[in-house]
């Protein structure tokens, strides 16, 4: 009974911590759909692919969203005909470089380990940029979104009136939220179950080997990561057990991809794209930590 109780408590904690950010992301997505036309977004994105990816990354700073919220925003950007490389760079970078996460990382590490703050920021940008470019090349001119024609049929509105805009935002926010909510609940249940049942001794076993430590904390981040704002403090608590490279791998991978977001991604994007994206994230973070840290 205690195990079930602990899983329920952890599930509620993950769910209610994620829900506000999911709603925020859906709201931002709705505002983009209502107020920003395809032509306006096209004018913002440079023709040069490298510059376009850089714009996508810094959109992550100016459109702050947690890892739970970026998927509906990125999906809406793709529907606005934004290049895949830009949307993916934004989706990966925003949960790491947005002001709230930067502030939490600063408070967690800056007094004792300031280099972790800077490494998380710099590697977050570089890895997002490289993966965005690679995904843009692999899936150039391909539709990666799972279409939802039913939603589109119910979202006609009069954008010329304030009332029409408000109704549009409410409808888009509601549809995007409830479309993703079922996947979030499923992912939160899996993550909470693993977090309660996984013995901490399994992780400590790897603490004497830097390579195994990186692999262990990447797996830990994928299954246990809660939110990019709280990951900083979880990572700080693990510093006494794991080397900095493993801690940084945890801080980078969790916001970019975890079990919750994998389920959400499979509900919104095509299977080949999701598998390619997850593989690239794991490879890039692992190689970066082994080579550079």
Image: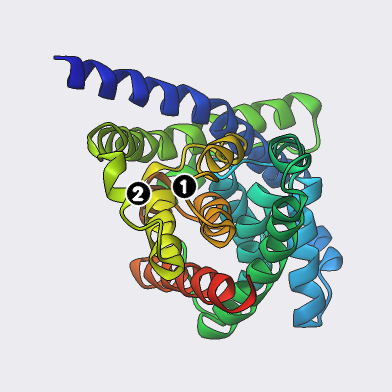
At label 1, counting other C-alpha atoms closer than 10 Å, the crowd grade (few under 14, some 14-19, many 20 or more) is some
The answer, for residue 81, to whether it is visible in the render is no
Q: On residue 101, which mark appears?
A: none
Taking depth in this image into account, of 234 and 52 the one nearest to the observer is: 234
Q: Tell me, yes or no, whether the two marked residues, 1 and 2, touch with CB atoms within 8 Å.
A: yes
Taking depth in this image into account, of 260 and 165 the one nearest to the observer is: 260
Residue shown at 54% from the left, 34% from the top: 22
Q: Which residue lies furthest to the left in this view?
A: 1
| Quarter location, residue 166 | top right
Rendering coords of residue 232 (x, y %) = 61, 40
At label 2, counting other C-alpha atoms closer than 10 Å, the crowd grade (few under 14, some 14-19, many 20 or more) is some
Residue shown at 68% from the left, 46% from the top: 33
**Quadrant for the N terminus in the image:** top left
Rendering coords of residue 99 (x, y %) = 78, 41
Q: On residue 241, which mark appears?
A: 1
Q: Name the residue under label 2.
A: 204
**Quadrant for the C terminus in the image:** bottom right
- Work out how far the residue at label 1 is from the one at label 2, CA to CA, in angstroms: 7 Å
Rendering coords of residue 46 (x, y %) = 84, 74
Q: What element carries label 1?
A: loop
Q: Is mark 2 on a helix, strand or loop?
A: helix
Residue shown at 39% from the left, 50% from the top: 220
Taking depth in this image into account, of 268 and 69 the one nearest to the observer is: 69
Mark 1 vs 2, N-terminal side:
2
The answer, for residue 155, to whether it is visible in the render is yes
């Amino acid at each position: 009974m205690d195990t079930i109780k602990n899983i329920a408590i952890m599930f509620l904690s993950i769910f209610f911590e994620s829900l506000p950010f999911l709603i925020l992301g859906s709201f931002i997505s709705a505002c983009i759909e209502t107020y920003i036309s395809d032509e306006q977004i096209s004018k913002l994105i440079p023709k040069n692919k490298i510059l376009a990816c850089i714009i996508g990354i810094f959109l992550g700073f100016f459109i702050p969203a947690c890892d739970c919220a970026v998927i509906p925003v990125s999906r809406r950007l793709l529907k606005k005909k934004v290049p895949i490389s830009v949307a993916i760079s934004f989706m990966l970078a925003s949960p790491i470089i947005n002001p709230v996460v930067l502030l939490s990382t600063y408070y967690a590490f800056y007094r004792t380990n300031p280099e972790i703050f800077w490494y998380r920021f710099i590697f977050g940008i570089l890895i997002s940029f490289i993966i965005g470019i690679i995904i843009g090349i692999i899936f150039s001119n391909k539709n990666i979104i799972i279409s939802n024609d039913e939603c589109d049929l119910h979202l006609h509105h009069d954008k010329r009136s304030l009332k029409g805009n408000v109704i549009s935002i409410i409808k888009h926010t509601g549809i995007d939220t409830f479309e993703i909510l079922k996947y979030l609940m499923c992912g939160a249940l899996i993550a909470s179950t693993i977090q309660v049942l996984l013995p901490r001794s399994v992780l400590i076993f790897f603490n004497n080997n830097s390579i195994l430590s990186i692999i262990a904390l990447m797996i830990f981040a994928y299954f246990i990561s809660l939110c990019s704002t709280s990951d900083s403090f979880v990572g700080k608590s693990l510093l006494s057990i794991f080397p900095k490279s493993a801690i940084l791998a945890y801080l980078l991978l969790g916001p970019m991809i975890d079990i919750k977001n994998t389920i959400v991604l499979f509900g919104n994007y095509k299977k080949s794209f999701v598998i390619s994206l997850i593989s690239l994230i794991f490879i890039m973070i692992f190689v970066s930590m082994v080579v550079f840290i």
